[in-house]
Amino acid sequence: MFRRIFHDFVIITLLATGFSLAQTGQSIFHDKIGAETAKMCGNKGHSVIELWNGYRIDCQMQDLQVEITITGTIIRSNSKSEGAGVFSIRAAQLGRKRLMTELPPEVDWVNANKNLVSCKRLNVVEEYTTSSDGIRQDFVIMDRPRGKGKLLLALAVEDADPILLGKEV
């Protein structure tokens, strides 16, 4: 899957910029692809758009859209080759093994600043960042949960089939 995406990326980059890395004899490591794309293409292809009830992030290179609103988050893949569809991933519970707190599906607020959209559910801020690498979802815990032991954040996934790689995420 990664190789196919990488080839599509190179073809798109070459067509969009007229620049060939093969001509210069350079190669790009996979963790530098986004930075190289940003240098060649600038910020074209990803944006944050204000909606009446939140924000939408468009990421054209990966054919993704994310709508972050007061009622929740919807992730939409428009990619025909990687699988089109709509799904969501959100923080559902936070705490320690025996002291888990339910987090509501609705958010307290939604805010945007340049390429970052964030929303807050009780003690958890979800951050969505867009760049040439794609859309990244982070979870920020505002206050230490009660109790002792491992910190646990349970995610609710709707309309997708997550695959566990290893014992824990």
Image: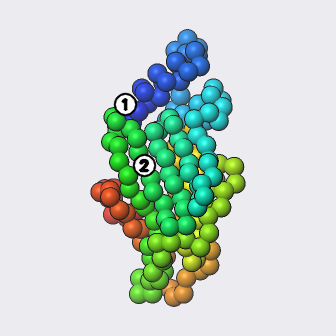
Residue 32 seen from this side = no
Question: Residue 123 placed where, x, y %?
Answer: 58, 77
Question: What amino acid type should be assigned to the residue bearing mark 1?
Answer: Arg
Residue placed under numbered mark 2 in the picture = 76
**Which residue does the image show at 38% across and 56% down from the upper left?**
87
Query: Farthest right residue?
Result: 113
In this view, the residue in front, 62 or 150, is: 62
**Which residue does the image show at 62% across and 28% down from the upper left?**
41
Secondary structure beneath dot 2 equals strand
Question: Residue 124 placed where, x, y %?
Answer: 56, 72
Question: Residue 2 placed where, x, y %?
Answer: 39, 36
**Which residue does the image show at 57% across and 78% down from the upper left?**
122
- Mark 1, residues whose alpha carbon is within 10 Å: few (<14), some, or many (≥20)? few
Secondary structure beneath dot 1 equals helix
- The C terminus lies in which quarter of the figure? bottom left
Query: Where 160 sits versus 156, above or below?
Result: above
In this view, the residue in front, 6 or 42, is: 42
- Please give the label number shown on residue 4: 1
- Mark 2, residues whose alpha carbon is within 10 Å: few (<14), some, or many (≥20)? some
Query: Where 128 sits versus 1, above or below?
Result: below
Whether label 2 touches label 1, CB < 8 Å: no
Query: Where 105 sits versus 1, above or below?
Result: below
Question: What amino acid type should be assigned to the residue bearing mark 2?
Answer: Arg
Q: CA distance from mark 2 to mark 1?
A: 20 Å
Residue 47 seen from this side = yes
Earlier along the polypeptide chain: callout 2 or callout 1? 1
**How many labels, in total?**
2
Question: Residue 96 placed where, x, y %?
Answer: 46, 82
- The N terminus lies in which quarter of the figure? top left
